[in-house]
Amino acid sequence: MNVAQRFRMRADEVGAVRAEIHELLRARGRTSCTWEVGTHATPGNLVERLLALGLVDDDPFPLAVGMVLTEEPLAAPPSIEVREVHTDEERLASARIAAVAFGSPLPTELPPREADGNNVEYLALIGGRPVARASGSFSENGASLFGGSTLPEARGQGGYRALVAARWAEAVRRGTPILVTQASPMSRPILAQPASARSARSASCSTPSAPEPLPPELPRP
Amino acid sequence: MIAPGELAENANTYTPLGPTDQRVIDDRYVLWRAAAISRT
């Protein structure tokens, strides 16, 4: 996964920055990148300029809303169990839910991963079955919420809400009761429930995914 | 302390890096590269 963001450039630098970022991706064998153009990005028409250079709108949600929660979110339904992901079995279950939700190929195994106390994965289970997953990235600035995804057949039952509540509880435990996220249309209504929720828009477009690492830039005429 | 609005708009700029994550910080952009698909 690659994300470019916090753009602060002049209009005549856009082409060079695009080429520079693609070169950084090529150097790592990466094939795609999400470009998140926030409210304060410059130049002001950056999305249009990037689209003109060959990037494409993110599908299906080209517009995310950055949200900040500073009050306790909705409580989790008591029937839903939330647990941190520790075992290989839990990691695979989490990755498979994400793959279904984001339309990626279903993984059958995962490479080993070191434990990381600041980047935590969670599973939500209904009747003992994993139905939703999410990540929380904890720092002195609060908790960033990533990758919230729920199996289609389990939506509307509170799995996502339970995962938000779990990350809020952990942020409170760490003394940083702030949650931030880029919310999709599906998660936005849930996150907007506390009166303290604030938001800022962020357009999102992508370098089209390629089967091989990004090709070299063509020489300019 | 980063302002919450800035954090929400540019979350990947400030989140702690995982063991295999990388971040390139430039005056004009920030590029975050991670192995994990699940942090998107």
Image (cartoon, coloured by chain):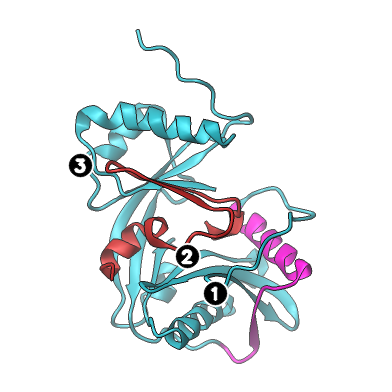
Q: Secondary structure at mark 3?
A: loop
Is the residue at mark 2 from the same chain as the one at mark 1? yes
Please determine whether, in this image, residue A174 is positioned above or below residue A99.
below
Q: Amino acid at mark 2?
A: Met
Q: Specify the label residue A44 is tagged with.
A: 3
Density class for disc 1 (Cα within 10 Å; few <14, some 14-19, many ≥20) is many
Residue A190 in the image: x percent, y percent?
Answer: 43, 75
Density class for disc 3 (Cα within 10 Å; few <14, some 14-19, many ≥20) is some
Q: Are marks 2 and 1 in contact (CB under 8 Å)?
A: yes
**Figure label count:** 3
Give the residue pinned by disc 1: A160
Q: What whole-number distance in Å separates the C-alpha atoms at marks 3 and 1?
A: 34 Å
Q: Earlier in the sequence, mark 2 or mark 3?
A: 3
Q: What whole-number distance in Å separates the C-alpha atoms at marks 2 and 3?
A: 27 Å
Q: Which residues are magenta?
A: A77-102
Give the residue pinned by disc 2: A186
Please give the letter of the chain rendered in red: B
Residue B23 in the image: x percent, y percent?
Answer: 44, 49
* Residue closer to the observer: B6 or B24: B24
Is the residue at mark 3 from the same chain as the one at mark 1? yes
Q: Are marks 3 and 1 in contact (CB under 8 Å)?
A: no
Q: Secondary structure at mark 2?
A: loop
* Residue closer to the observer: A144 or A174: A174
Q: Amino acid at mark 1?
A: Tyr
